[in-house]
Amino acid sequence: MSQTLDQFRLTPSAAARVAEILNADPESKALRVEVLAGGCSGFQYKFDLTATQHPDDLVIAAEGATVYVDPTSLELLAGAELDFKDALMGAHFAVKNPNATSACGCGTSFSID
């Protein structure tokens, strides 16, 4: 079962991995998830560790993990879910975004209509 907020969710595997990363880096307070213009499909996801929370950030806290999402990015992430995949070909965060109408092969950029 995923951590649910109306705007954005974390799966248990994403929450566990974020918590693990934050525990290993005591200077960071959260994982910031952003959507930026660019990438091969129009928008791209960006993940950064941060110690800075902006006053208008959505704060998601789940299972020892903290994630910040800014309001502009949140508009493009409404209803989306952050997951963590640990597969033979590598481990990575993945966003399941119902707003994306297409995505590139690398999975880090998307477009909307």
Image (cartoon, grey):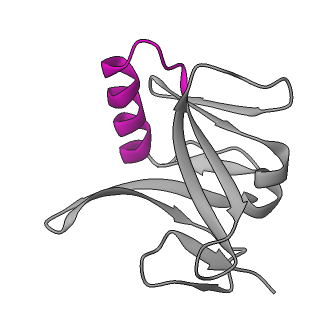
Name of the residue lying farthest toward the top: 26
Residue 46, image x, y percentages:
57, 53
Please, what is the dominant secondary structure of the magenta stretch? Answer: helix
Q: Nearer the viewer, residue 3 or 93?
A: 93
Q: Is 31 placed above or below 107 here?
A: above
Q: Quadrant of the C terminus?
A: bottom right
Left or right placement of residue 29 versus residue 71 in this view = left
Q: Nearer the viewer, residue 74 or 48?
A: 48
Left or right placement of residue 92 versus residue 90 in this view = right
- Residue sitting at 41 percent across and 24 percent down? 22
- Answer with the quarter of the image where residue 37 lies: bottom right
- Residue sitting at 35 percent across and 38 percent down? 17
Residue 21, image x, y percentages:
35, 30
* Residue range (magenta): 12-30
- Residue sitting at 77 percent across and 63 percent down? 76
- Residue sitting at 70 percent across and 60 percent down? 36
Residue 91, image x, y percentages:
26, 56
Q: Is 48 placed above or below 25 here?
A: below
- Answer with the quarter of the image where residue 80 lies: bottom right
Q: Is 52 placed above or below 48 here?
A: above
In the image, residue 27 lies in the stretch drawn in magenta: yes
Residue 55, image x, y percentages:
85, 23
Marks counted in the figure total 0
